[in-house]
Image (tube, rainbow, N blue to C red):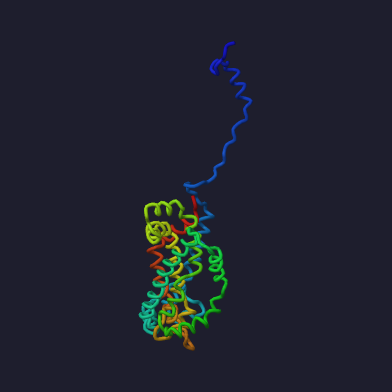
Amino acid sequence: MTMTSPTDVPEPLLTASSAHRAPKRTRRFTPGAGQQLKGGPFSYLALAVVGIGSLLPLYWTLVAASHTQDEMLAGTPPFLPGGRLLHNLEAAWTQAHLGKAIVNSVVVAGCITAATLFFCTLAGYAFAKMRFRGRGALMTAVILTLTIPPQLSVVPLFMMMADLGWGGDLEAVIFPTLVSAFGVFFMRQYLSEALPYELIEAAKIDGAHNFRIVLSVVLPVARPAMMVLGMLTFVQAWNDFFWPYLALNQQNPTLQVALGQLSASYTPDTSIVMAGALISTLPLLVVFVLFGKRIVGGIMSGAVKG
């Protein structure tokens, strides 16, 4: 019996057999990783509307800070900046003593941000990768503290600061917020996904102790999340008004407390108040311009896995 190879099959048979095959379906394009999507006109229009809406309050603050109060209270308020911006900025700086207030805000926000990043990263690493008794119960307790309104702790916290002799000092604002429950939860969620156990085990095999592991392994991996958490913490500490208003006095205020003095009179000058608000916003804009790319990169690295 002779065997025939596929090359010996007559061409009509191959054509007939291939004719009975089901035609291949054309696969539709599905966007995947590494493929850049292009937006249409509606996408650009939506982005333009959102961008203009986001910048409109800042622009209106600039317009109000560059005019007099009478011009702003006219029947048709101006929509273009005026020529009194420098005069109103100088008046706000002098009336509210913003020089010392800005220094206090930088010290408070900087200390709170640095301490929050350090302690929350350590706690997040412990909850994410270490095995110890009561870990789940402690993490649940940390999350439950987020449900407690801050107003409930004002009276005992104020009494505690008074007993420590920190009434009116910056320590009364810094120490109660050195660690945040949100920061611990945020770092724990990030490190549980971004930090593999193999890196930790490899460092232990090389003889690294826990503190060395944190410095050489945990901190480089956690840097994107730390940038995001640092930005959020700095903005919150910079804009905080309620607790600094209660804990500090008028001779040693933060920036937001000092700005409250501009509107504390019976007939406050709206233009000078807006000029003070513009001064308080400029440092945040500078921080975002300098670190905005890294912050957005950290947000994207935490949102996209794989």
The picture places residue 145, in percent across and down from the top left corner, at 55, 71
Q: Nearer the viewer, residue 71 or 12?
A: 12
User: Residue furthest toward the right?
Assistant: 20
- Residue 92 appears anywhere in the view: yes
Q: Nearer the viewer, residue 152 or 210?
A: 210
User: Residue furthest toward the bottom?
Assistant: 266
Picture quadrant where residue 249 is located: bottom left
Q: Looking at the picture, does residue 44 appear above or below residue 177?
A: above
The picture places residue 169, in percent across and down from the top left corner, at 40, 82
The picture places residue 61, in percent across and down from the top left corner, at 45, 74
Give the residue drawn at x 49%, y 89%.
Answer: 266
Q: Looking at the picture, does residue 281 appear above or below residue 299?
A: below
- Residue 269 appears anywhere in the view: no
Picture quadrant where residue 4 is located: top right
- Judged left or right of residue 157, residue 207 is left
Q: Looking at the picture, does residue 269 appear above or below residue 15?
A: below
Q: How many marks?
A: 0
Image quadrant containing the N terminus: top right
The picture places residue 102, in percent across and down from the top left corner, at 38, 77
Give the residue drawn at x 41%, y 70%.
Answer: 115
